[in-house]
Amino acid sequence: MEKLGNFFINGIEQFFSYSSFAHFEFGNILMILIALVFIYLAVVKDYEPLLLIPIGFGIIVGNVPFYPGLKIGVYETGSVMNYLYFGVIQGVYPPLIFLGIGAITDFSALLSNPKLILIGAAAQVGIFIAYAAALYIGFTPAEAGAIGIIGGADGPTDIFLASKLAPDLMGAIAISAYSYMALVPVIQPPIMRLLTSKKERLIRMKPSRAVAKREKVIFPIIGLMLTTFIVPSGMPLLGMLFFGNLLKESGVTRRLALTAGGPLIDIVTILLGLTVGASTQANTFLTPKSVMIFGLGAASFVVATLGGVLFVKFMNLFLKDGSKINPLIGNSGVSAVPDAARVSQVVGQEYDKSNHLLMHAMGPNVAGVIGSAVAAGVLLSFLY
C-alpha cells in the first residue's frame, strides 16, 4: 500500500514538473500582458490586425513555459515551431511578402509625379540617424544596422536585415518595428501638425496625370535594374517586389498576381507573425538591449517622419505656386503602406474636407518601400 502511495505521489510530482506551472516566471506574465495589449490594439483599435493578432498570439505561445527537451519551443532544434521559424532566421519569408506587396501595389501615383520619390528617400534619414545612435551607445556595427532599419517602418525589411546582421536581436527588432507600424495613426499626426502651418496644410496639389499601361509594365523592369545595379545586395527584396508588380501590371498573369497578393502573402504573414511572436520568450527577450532597441526604434521612426515633412517644405522653396506639394504627405515617405498615406489623408481633411491627399501620398509611400529596401541593401553591403 505504501509503495502504491509513493508511486502515486511520484507520478503527481512528475506530472507537475512537466506542467507550465513548475517553470512559470514573472517575465512570462509580463510578455503575455504585452501580447494582450497587441491583440487589444488589433481588435478594438483596428491597428494593423493582420500583423498584431498573429504576433500577439505568438507571444502567448512563446511564453507558455515547458520542460526542456520536449521539442516544442521555437528555439529547440527539431521542433515544429523551430522548422517554421527557419523562414524567419534564414530570411525566406520577407522576400515572399515583398512579392505579394508588389502584386497589390499600384505605382501610378509615383510614375505620374516622379519627384515624389525624393520624399521617400528623405524619410530614410531615420534609418541612418538610428544607426549612428546605436553605435554611440555601444551596439556593434552589425547590430546597429539591424536596429536602424526600424526607421523605415517596414517589418519584412527589418526581419530580413536582422536575420543577416543580428539574429540574436530578431525578436526585439521585429516587435519594435511592427509596434511602431501599428501606431502610425498615433505617432505621426502630432509631428505633422507641429511642423506645418495652416496655410501649408491647405495646399491643393495638381491632379495626377493618367499613367499609360506601357509605363506601368516598363517600370518594374527599369526599377529593378536601376536599384539592384547600384545595390545588388538588395536583390532578394527588390527583385521580388518588382517581379510581383510585373505580374500585376502585365495583364497576362492575373492568376499569379492574385495568388501572390492574396493566399501567398496571407499564409506567409501568418507564419511570420506567429513565429516572430513565439521567439519572444521572456528569458531571451527581456534584456536591457531590448529596452534600448525599443527606444532607438521610436526615435528613428520620429526622425523619419520629421525628415519626410521637412524635405517637402524644402522642396516647396524651389517650386512655383500651383506646383507646390502639401507637406502633410511628407509623413508617407516611410514605407508603412498604405497606413501612412491614410494618415496624410485624414490629417489633411481635418483642415479641408474637400482636399483629397490619399493618391498623392501613395507616391512617396511606395517610394518609401523601395527606399527602405535600398537602405537595407546598403547596410548589408557594408556590414554583412
Image (spheres, rainbow, N blue to C red):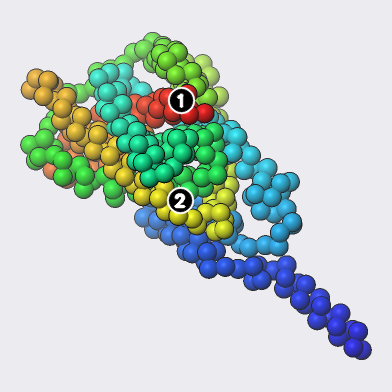
Q: Is residue 236 above or below residue 219?
A: below
Q: Amino acid at mark 2?
A: Lys
Q: Is residue 66 above or below residue 363?
A: below
Find out whether the residues at labels 1 and 2 contact each other: C-beta distance under 8 Å.
Answer: no
Left or right: 153, with 355 as reference point: right
Q: Nearer the viewer, residue 194 or 206?
A: 194
In what element is the residue under mark 2?
A: helix
Residue 355 image-quadrant placement? top left
Q: Residue at x 45, y 51 (%)?
A: 290
Tag 1: Cα neighbours inside 10 Å, few (<14), some, or many (≥20)? few
Q: Residue at x 52, y 64 (%)?
A: 27
Q: Nearer the viewer, residue 330 or 50?
A: 330
Which residue is label 1 attached to?
A: 382
Q: Decide if residue 327 is in sight here.
A: yes
Left or right: 64, with 368 as reference point: right
Q: Whole-Å distance between the Cαs marked 1 and 2?
A: 23 Å
Q: Residue at x 45, y 13 (%)?
A: 229
